[in-house]
Image (cartoon, grey):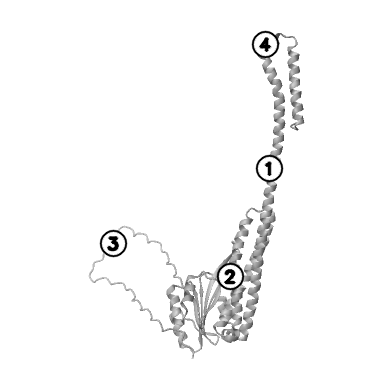
Amino acid sequence: MTPDRRGSRPTPMPKKHAWRRPGTPTGTPAPPRSTQPPPAAPPHHPAPEPHRSVVEAAVYRDGRRIASPATLAETFRTLREQQDGMAWIGLHRPTESELHSLAAEFNLHPLAVEDALEAHQRPKLERYGDTLFVVLRAARYLDAPEEVDFGELHVFVGTDFLITVRHAAAPDLSAVRSRMEESPDLLALGPEAVLYAILDAVVDGYAPVVEGVQIDIDEIETEVFRGDPEVSRRIYELSREMVEFQRATRPLVGMLHALMAGFAKYGTDEELQRYLRDVADHVTHTSERVDGFRQALTEILTVNATLVTQQQNAEMRALAEAGFEQNEEIKKISSWAAILFAPTLVGTIYGMNFEDMPELKWAGGYPFAILLMAVVCTSLYVIFKKRDWL
């Protein structure tokens, strides 16, 4: 006989008494009416709606929903009343007390409960007795910021229950529940069928992400050869997202093969075996695409670094050529300045009005001064010309 995996029924919380306005004592005189206008009423701010951890809970029998309990306690009670029922409980960021209540009811392992509380777990598959604990990483592509958003999903699978714990907006399992309820024959196969449907939904959610990333890579290649200065940052950010994508898909391949290895041992239905093989093929293809994306981004980053280096070398070469041309111009200007400075110096000396200068009364002084200026200028020109300054 299979031991009872659920604990004792939790004690219901005592009901609170309703608040009642006390009456006015008899004979109390009414207060005098004030002539001042009444103060303005403060603006009404509606109280925020409390966070609902239980997204949806339902009890099924023979693949059809027979109850939709509003609370966990009601779900436990309804499931106990059914002989061949199955509970499917969906939680979003549950509290510690709620998870401990589920652990007591369905005999969940403390380590699995601790992992579900802490989140930030790697994808994995673990078995604790008759209960499977599965961690999945869902992904979705956000068009506006052009980035990949990852969500974490924890799944507890037992013989007559399945519990999903989400810590992010993705994945949305309402479509999975609707599709399964439209296929009662598949849902009648039990919690394993629901697990495989969730795996399929998570893997199918990778397809839009792969398409979005492929478009991003095509755009990045165009930006690289266009010389966009911001492309390096975009390559780096997308590379980090691909690392996260690899962490989500690579372990999933091994998890699905481990499930397939247990087909014979746990007597998995033939239809579910085909279903799981198809999911395994899809996730293998996705994992290969992600590996290709990361390699392509590495190569693009290398090409971008090469192009940036070439551009910097070209700029340095242009600066060097401009500096060389400036030096040539400076040489020419300096040479002509020196040539013109020589006659200016001679003329300045002989232009001084001193009576003791012997050349002032010499008849050949002026021709000598002109000849001296010509000789000096010619000599400087020849010297600068030989040095290629002119």
Q: Quadrant of residue 237?
A: bottom right
In x, y percent, where is residue 199? 58, 76
Mark whose residue sits in front, 4 or 1: 4
Would residue 307 be seen by someone viewing this image from the given angle? yes
Q: Quadrant of residue 34?
A: bottom left
Mark whose residue sits in front, 2 or 3: 2
Mark 2 near mark 1, Cβ–Cβ under 8 Å? no
- Residue 357 numbered tag: 4
Of pointers 2 and 3, the one earlier in the residue sequence = 3
- Residue 319 numbered tag: 1
**Does residue 7 appear to the left or right of 213 in the view shown?**
left
Q: Which residue is mark 2?
A: 248
Question: In the displayed structure, would residue 355 be above or below residue 243?
Answer: above
Tag 2, which secondary structure? helix
Q: Which residue is mark 3?
A: 33
**Does residue 155 appear to the left or right of 314 in the view shown?**
left
Amino acid type at image mark 1: Leu
